[in-house]
C-alpha cells in the first residue's frame, strides 16, 4: 500500500482507496459471537482435597476436581465450549 518505507501518510491515492475498501469489507464480515447457553444447561461442581477450610502449609499439594454435566436438550447444544477456572492473584 505504501511500499517498504514511509508510513500511512506516504500511501498513494490508489493505496488509500484499496486500504479503506479492505477495512470496510472486513468489518462487514465479522464472525457472529456464539451465544452462551442458558444457565440451567450446565451443572458444575468443584471440590478440593484437602477440603475447603482445612489448614494447609506452603508446599502442600491441593488437588482440585471439576465435574460438569450438560443437559441433553437442543437449547444446550454447542459445538465447543470453554470452561475457565482462573487462579486468583
Image: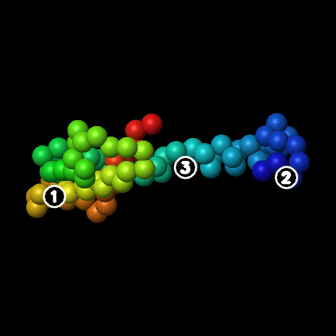
Could you tell me how far apart the alpha carbons at marks 2 and 3 are, in whole angstroms?
22 Å
Mark closest to the chain's N terminus, 2 or 3: 2
Crowdedness near tag 2: few (<14), some (14–19) or many (≥20) residues, C-alpha within 10 Å: few
Question: Residue 56 got which mark?
Answer: none
- Front-most of 70 and 19? 70
Proximity of marks 2 and 3: CB atoms separated by less than 8 Å: no
Number of the front mark, 1 or 3: 1
Q: Residue at x 21, y 50 (%)?
A: 47
Mark closest to the chain's N terminus, 2 or 1: 2
- Front-most of 34 and 88? 88
- Front-most of 72 and 65? 65
Q: Is residue 65 above or below residue 87?
A: below
Proximity of marks 1 and 3: CB atoms separated by less than 8 Å: no
Mark closest to the chain's N terminus, 1 or 3: 3
- At mark 1, the secondary structure is strand
- Left or right position of 62 against 6: left
Residue 16: quadrant of the picture: top right
Question: Residue 3 got which mark?
Answer: 2
Q: Residue at x 55, y 49 (%)?
A: 25
- At mark 2, the secondary structure is loop
- At mark 3, the secondary structure is helix
- Front-most of 34 and 82? 82
Question: Residue 69 got which mark?
Answer: 1
Residue with the mark numbered 3: 26
Residue 61 % position (x, y): 36, 54
Residue 42 % position (x, y): 17, 51
Crowdedness near tag 3: few (<14), some (14–19) or many (≥20) residues, C-alpha within 10 Å: few
Let me know if residue 46 appears in the view: no
Q: Residue at x 60, y 45 (%)?
A: 23
Quadrant showing the C terminus: top left
Residue 69 % position (x, y): 16, 58
Crowdedness near tag 1: few (<14), some (14–19) or many (≥20) residues, C-alpha within 10 Å: few
Amino acid at each position: 500500500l505504501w511500499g517498504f518505507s514511509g508510513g500511512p501518510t506516504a500511501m498513494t491515492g490508489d493505496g488509500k482507496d484499496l486500504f479503506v475498501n479492505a477495512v470496510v469489507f472486513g468489518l462487514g464480515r465479522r464472525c457472529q459471537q456464539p451465544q452462551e447457553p442458558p444457565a440451567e444447561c450446565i451443572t458444575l461442581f468443584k471440590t478440593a482435597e484437602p477440603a475447603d477450610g482445612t489448614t494447609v502449609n506452603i508446599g502442600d499439594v491441593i488437588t482440585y476436581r471439576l465435574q460438569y454435566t450438560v443437559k441433553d436438550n437442543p437449547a444446550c447444544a454447542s459445538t465447543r465450549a470453554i470452561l475457565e477456572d482462573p487462579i486468583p492473584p
